[in-house]
Image: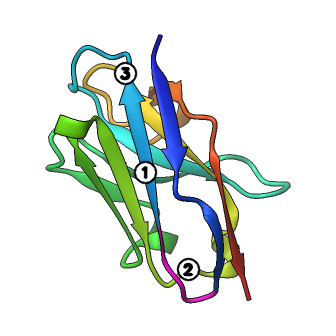
């Protein structure tokens, strides 16, 4: 049973920072990409950031480039997302995603496992 458990969400003022973490368990290898998606109230879930299995490649949506940084520690089976200069429009439930084998989860169709989400609220 694969599990992804997120943590690090919360309430922060505009301009503030948060770091999300996601611990993966149940997969026997690390040959898969990981990523983050988010879903704001009344909107569809969207891709935010992803990282390849060895951390060598990263991907971001334009709206978070320069503000968010994704990283991973395979020894700890953990992926992180440092979020700086947060804006009210970043308010959403953030979901951790693990790609299929050798897949980087930049779209929902490439996601093999989802976390349950962690809420990030940015006040103005």
Among the two numbered marks 2 and 3 on one chain, the one whose residue lies closer to the N terminus: 2
User: Which residue position holds label 1?
Assistant: 21
Alpha carbon distance from label 2 to label 3 = 30 Å
* Dot 1 or dot 2, earlier in sequence: 1
Which residue is labeled 2 in the image?
86
Which numbered disc, 1 or 2, marks the residue closer to the eye? Answer: 1
Q: Which residue is at 63% across, 70% downward?
A: 90
On screen, residue 119 versus residue 29, left or right, reads: right
How many residues crowd mark 3 within 10 Å: few (<14), some (14–19), many (20+)?
some
Along the line of sight, which residue is nearer the eye, 57 or 80? 80
Residue 53 can be seen in this image: no
Q: Which numbered mark, 2 or 3, is in the foreground of this view?
A: 2
Query: Which segment is the magenta one?
Result: 14-18
Q: Write down the residue under mark 3.
A: 100
Q: Residue most toward the right?
A: 42
> In the rendering, at what x and y percent does residue 110 appear?
44, 28
């Amino acid at each position: 049973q694969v599990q992804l458990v997120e943590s690090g969400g919360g309430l922060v003022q505009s301009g503030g920072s948060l770091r999300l973490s996601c611990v993966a368990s149940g997969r026997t290898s690390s040959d898969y990409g990981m990523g983050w998606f988010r879903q704001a109230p009344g909107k569809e879930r969207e891709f935010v950031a992803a990282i390849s299995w060895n951390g060598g490649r990263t991907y971001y949506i334009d709206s978070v480039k320069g503000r968010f940084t994704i990283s991973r520690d395979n020894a700890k089976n953990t992926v992180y997302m440092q979020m700086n200069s947060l804006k009210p429009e970043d308010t959403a439930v953030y979901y951790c995603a693990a790609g299929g084998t050798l897949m980087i989860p930049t779209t929902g169709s490439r996601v093999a496992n989802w976390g349950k989400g962690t809420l990030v609220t940015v006040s103005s």
